[in-house]
Image (tube, coloured by chain):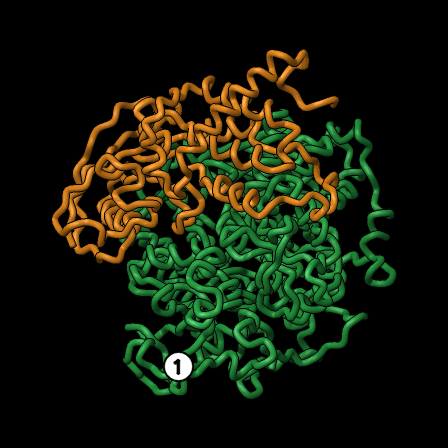
Amino acid sequence: MSTLPNTVKLDARIPEGPLPEKWARRKNEMKLVAPNNKRKYEVIIVGTGLGGASAAASMAEMGYNVKSFCFQDSPRRAHSIAAQGGINAAKNYQNDGDSVHRLFYDTIKGGDFRSREANVYRLAQVSVNIIDQCVAQGVPFAREYGGLLTNRSFGGAQVSRTFYARGATGQQLLIGAYQALSRQVGKGRIQLFPRTEMIDLVLVDGHAKGVVIRDLVTGEISTHTADAVVLATGGYGNVFYLSTYARGSNATAIWRAYKRGAALANPCFTQIHPTCIPVTGDYQSKLTLMSESLRNDGRVWVPKKQKDNRPPSSIPEDERDYFLERMYPSYGNLAPRDISSRAAKRVCDEGRGVGASGLGVYLDFADVTKRIGEAGVREKYSNLFQMYNEITAEDAYKSPMRIYPAVHYTMGGLWVDYQLMSNIPGLFVVGEANFSDHGANRLGASALMQGLADGYFVLPYTIGDYLAGEKPAKRPRADAPEFTAAKADASARLDQLLAIKGKKPVSEFHRELGKILWEKCGMARNEAGLKEALALIPKLREEFWKEAAIPGTSGEFNQGLEKANRVADFIELGELLVRDALTRRESAGCHFREEFQEEGECKRNDDDFAHVAAWTYNGENAEPTRNVEPLAYENIKLATRSYK
Amino acid sequence: MNFTLKVWRQKDAKSAGRFETHEARDINPNMSFLEMLDVVNDGLSIKGESPISFDHDCREGICGTCSLVINGDPHGPTDGTTTCQLYMRSFQDGDVIVVEPWRVRAFPILRDLVTDRSAFDRIIQSGGFISVNTGQAPEANSVPVSHPQAEAAFDAAHCIGCGACAAVCKNGSPMLFVAAKVAHLNGLPQGQPERSERVMNMVRTLDAEGFGSCTHTTACEAVCPKHIPYELIVRLNREFIAASIHESLSHEPVAGGGAG
């Protein structure tokens, strides 16, 4: 492997001009590819969630040849499908004072002033187009009796700007994007490769020009060339083992890109969602979210007394602590996720948690049921109550839900510039896989917005600007030496995994990694703990490569090998995550360093850390480089983030 | 709890399959069925034996990936749930549990309990969409959709494409899947322009993929994890008849993407 650069230049390429005009100005400046030339270009898009499916459909509609890869058996199953609560847009249909500027400001503030102004402003601008597009596709958003769209509220906002389709908004939006993608598959403009996994990125002359793919059914390893590569492979939250992610969600694509030179930004910004069904035992394979939308009507409380074992119905009103309403009166139960999660942790740490483990708080619907009746609650949330009942065998119409925070989303991801291109030319990253818009904490209902903004309305423009400078005739052949070498590397790694022949199941390594990260780098972090984690993870990695039990061969359908390959990457990524948390010596959003706090709230250090930390790889066992992109705020004033 | 599993094992699409017996020991009643299989698989991988392959992903009942026939029932004994939402507390200690893949001609078995359901994708590709390019959409509130219409569209669109309807059907017919998509899109004003072509194209693809025909046993409705009602198949038939007449009276070819 060639030597990799120690530092990279992180030019965000933010357009000149006043904030509201930046995107329009950039669109006018960008180079175009003529319609009759578009069909000469090949674009690879990995992942078929909201970002990947919308990008694939939009680019194919424009005339590009698209190859779309996903590890699932169908593009419709990508994990965007599990998003429940809604999607934000600055339509101001409720006449409650919303605007592009307000959505922009809420998102920047929600992210604790650690995201880029220009990106976030563009996101708020295109949010309104997303709703139009989805309605035209037939997404059945909730409506008023007059036939017009309705909204609800989400955390961190004092307006109602969230569009929703009961508790399955992600499903409906993804099916919309999947159908748009399917239409292009039917027309032959998209070639679909389900049950395939990207196991390496291929660079030619420093540009991303293809990928190495493993067919998960036959085990065959192949290479695919393209004029540009788009990663839409989602977040890396499964590094914590237990999370609300799908079991298959993995970081392999972004991690292999990182190892090929792409910068990975702010990996320590990992969102812990306050309202999930609590952990009940070691056997658990995943955690289930209860949508934030429930906090529109549910009230969060714990008993005032410690270790109060009475059933919730026998605890009188004046012995309950509605702690979010008490601590954050102006936002109440709709305080942002990081803040609500920390508050829940705090009351549980005080010994006031509920349930057998003491790690839980109540989410109570008694008041709303009195107000609108059980039938009214059912219409708004029935599928969530049903899901809760299936998992816990409890009836939340009768007694409050028990909830606790769980890993849910990663704000960190591959570094991209304003055009969504990484520091590797030709490598674009969309959706949760990039780091761009949410800073240190994402607001609820903004992930769907960002995935679709990137795929429908940003990437299709910006990728053209890159492609216009690349001649299709220059596209390398599949047997170019870079491809042959990358394929050999990827095969060798799989063989290395299969050669371990250890006695310890891969899931145990994954569980141990998750435990280290949850305890030392979860909702609260401190220097001593992070240093311990930095010592423990390399040991775990070493043990993995000696002891992991990975059965079978690489030339067959082998789910054990798939898992091992992903867990090996998670272990490496976990180490970087901790390193990032250790070096960010401030508290911001989800990243709560116990040393840096003021009355239990985050204490940012804008003098030293108002920047993006983007890490680049320097080889195995070498320390990675921490590159810095300063965040310049020209339009808003950095303020202490308060929801009190 | 302890269980004896009789599991379908098959190396690949070409090989013959057989049942294999495995023991699941010390299972917590609050484990999901798939978590129980995880435990069995960890045991197999330590012994260097081949773990049981099965499809799963979100494990919260929405992605539609998991697909096991348990004691003869697609998604197991509980009503309105997917396999991943089935908990071991639904079984008795000591039970013998038979685990099989979807058995549908148009869903070939890839390995053990994993089948290839890409025929469903091809049905959608042939017409399960509204043709609107990115950027063409009018303002969202310019077309009102009545509250009941929107709710009915959601109920149909809630289908997760798991294939249980076809798996339970003695004819291997996924008519409920097609009916749900047609009800979703044809039930909205945005879906009207392609109403007839959509039905004809999707039904033709269904036939071409080798699925069976619907004989109205309504078994599908009973196993659907999202409670998609059989009534939608009746509506699909009405749509199909109307579309057939429309097609026979029209001189335009049905397939194709417009003026292009």
Q: Is residue A365 left or right of residue B143?
A: left
Q: Residue A117: x and y, percent? A: 74, 65
Q: Chain B rendered in what hue?
A: orange
Residue A40 located left or right of residue A529: right
Dot 1 falls on which chain?
Answer: A
- Counting from the top left corner in percent of width and height, residue B79 is at 30, 45
Residue B37 x/y as whole percent: 27, 47
- In depth, the one of B247 and A561 nearer the eye is B247
Residue occupying the point 30% across, 29% down: B11
Badge 1 crowding class, 10 Å Cα cut-off, few under 14, some 14 to 19, many 20 or more, is few
> Compared with residue A644, is residue B186 higher up or lower down, i.e. above or below?
above
Q: Residue at x 48, y 78 (%)?
A: A343
Element type where label 1 sits in the image: helix
Q: Is residue A502 above or below residue B247?
A: below
- Residue at horizontal 46 percent and vertical 34 percent from the top: A215
Tally of numbered tags: 1
> In which quarter of the view is residue A507 placed?
bottom left
Q: Residue furthest left?
A: B94
Residue drawn at 45 percent across, 72 percent down: A367
Query: Disc 1 designates what residue?
Result: A349
Which one is in front, A146 or A101? Answer: A146
Disc 1 residue type (three-letter) = Asp
What shade does chain A have? green
Q: Quadrant of residue A404?
A: bottom left
Q: Which quadrant is home to the C terminus of chain A?
A: bottom right
Q: Is residue A96 visible in the rendered structure shown here?
A: yes
Question: Where residue A50 appears, x then y in whole percent?
Answer: 59, 46
Horizontal arrangement in the rendering, residue A399 relative to residue B100 (left or right): right
